[in-house]
């Protein structure tokens, strides 16, 4: 398999293969423009669906028989080819794959070979819902064009710089080591991208800036980034730890599991489903969409109000904790769907933190805006920013840099 850049090419295809869906974007790295994007969903669920949008063109949607990821990727490849952007085009220099769990083995983007595939397979117990789908996407893309380098970009890689005292859980060391139990962290491509973009927004180099990144979507995580290196993060062995999320509980007393097993007669699968799928905002008020929670709260709904307060309390605790971890904070950056769009969440998250130098300007916080922007008053000691994340561009950038070396 070729590992170097193909002559004359500057396109990277980014694939995010989930358990029943594949998202894709084709980027031109000369100017970071999107040439096409699409979503294949309901894989293996009977009638699948494909939506494809070429740059400057109309969105095309159709149903298709998609029994597996191979069929899904072949369908996506067909749509790209119809626009003259096929996987066999000489301009395509790499396919970048989001891989959720890289364990401790993968600290940076990696060109995929059989050894890499075997290691990702070995890590499946740490991400049983994600790594198998990621592997299916990689293997199918390799089959479709064996000459194009496949680059794995790992959600966990940015967090492999955590010092051992931050990554270790205080349990028996031999047990932890035997079963790979430690804090890995997730959303790493987003935290890496946003921390760098925040430094640029301040007109400084990443190595000069300490940033608290708050990635707030349906899944949510916080990170403490010191001089471009992650030194702490809220998600742990799995994406369940940390902040309150759309359907995940975040931090919970581990003994809740034992209590539910003894008192409620719930088995491991029941408790797993409870904490991952029926907790967080949806568990507290029945809605996992922050927009709906905010609407209900504004109308005086008590359950939505409590859900919001629990969410904000946890978020504010992490901001304070990471101020302590970093010692000096230059910026707090909000990103992802909730972080970028929910002004009430941003305002509430930093309310009362003026003593730490963190506050928002009310008008700037609520003003519409799509790009990176500061929402803190000029006199604030700590910049507060809204920085739209772009995980696909981050994956493409890392893949492109690797195959060009």
Image: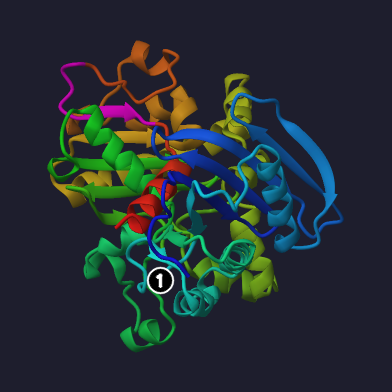
Tell me residue 392's x, y (percent).
Answer: 48, 44
Tell me residue 347's x, y (percent).
Answer: 38, 25
Question: Circle 1 sits on which residue?
Answer: 103
Above-or-below relation of 370 to 276 = above
Residue at point 64% right, 55% down?
A: 277
Residue at point 31% right, 74% down?
A: 170
Q: 341 or 370, which lies in front?
A: 370
Mark 1 secondary-structure assignment: loop
Q: Is residue 117 left or right of residue 359?
A: right
Above-or-below relation of 5 to 359 = below
Tell me residue 232's x, y (percent).
Answer: 28, 56
| Label 1 CA crowd tier, 10 Å (few <14, some 14–19, many 20+) | many
| Number of numbered tags placed on the structure image | 1
Residue at point 51% right, 72% down?
A: 126
Query: Where, by quadrant of the figure, is residue 339 drawn?
Result: top left
Q: Is residue 100 left or right of residue 86?
A: left
Q: 191 or 39, which lies in front?
A: 39
Residue 288 visible: no
Which residues are the magenta region?
A: 378-387
Tell me residue 372's x, y (percent).
Answer: 35, 26
- Residue 168 drawn in magenta: no
Q: Is residue 355 left or right of residue 361?
A: left
């Amino acid at each position: 398999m070729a590992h170097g850049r193909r002559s004359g090419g500057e396109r990277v295809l980014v694939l995010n293969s989930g358990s029943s869906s594949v998202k894709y974007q084709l980027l031109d790295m000369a100017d970071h423009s999107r040439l096409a994007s699409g979503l294949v969903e309901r894989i293996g669920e009977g009638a699948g669906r494909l939506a494809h949008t070429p740059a400057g063109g109309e969105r095309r949607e159709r149903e298709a028989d998609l029994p597996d990821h191979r069929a899904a990727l072949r369908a996506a490849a067909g749509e790209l080819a119809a626009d003259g952007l096929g996987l066999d085009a000489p301009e395509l220099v790499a396919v970048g794959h989001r891989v959720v769990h890289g364990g401790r083995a993968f600290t940076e983007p990696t060109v995929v070979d059989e050894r890499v595939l075997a290691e990702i397979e070995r890590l499946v117990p740490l991400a049983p819902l994600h790594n198998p789908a990621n592997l299916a996407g990689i293997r199918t893309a390799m089959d479709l064009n064996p000459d194009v380098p496949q680059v794995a970009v790992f959600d966990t890689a940015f967090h492999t710089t955590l010092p051992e005292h931050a990554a270790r859980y205080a349990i028996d060391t031999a047990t932890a080591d035997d079963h790979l139990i430690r804090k890995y962290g997730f959303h790493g491509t987003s935290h890496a991208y946003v921390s760098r973009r925040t430094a640029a927004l301040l007109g400084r180099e990443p190595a000069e800036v300490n940033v608290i990144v708050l990635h707030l979507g349906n899944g949510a995580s916080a990170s403490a980034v010191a001089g471009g290196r992650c030194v702490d993060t809220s998600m742990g062995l799995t994406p369940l730890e940390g902040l309150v999320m759309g359907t995940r509980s975040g931090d919970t007393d581990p003994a809740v599991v034992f209590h539910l097993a003894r008192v409620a007669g719930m088995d491991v699968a029941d408790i797993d489903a409870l904490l991952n799928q029926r907790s967080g905002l949806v568990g507290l008020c029945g809605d996992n969409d922050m927009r709906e929670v905010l609407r209900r709260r504004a109308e005086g709904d008590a359950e939505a109000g409590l859900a919001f307060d629990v969410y904000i309390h946890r978020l504010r605790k992490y901001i304070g904790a990471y101020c302590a971890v970093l010692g000096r904070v230059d910026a707090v950056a909000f990103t992802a769907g909730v972080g970028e769009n929910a002004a009430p969440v941003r305002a509430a998250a930093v309310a009362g933190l003026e003593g730490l130098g963190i506050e928002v300007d009310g008008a700037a916080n609520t003003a519409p805006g799509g790009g990176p922007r500061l929402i803190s008053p000029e006199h604030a000691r700590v910049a507060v920013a809204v920085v739209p994340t772009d995980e696909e561009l981050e994956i493409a950038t890392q893949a492109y840099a690797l195959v060009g070396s």
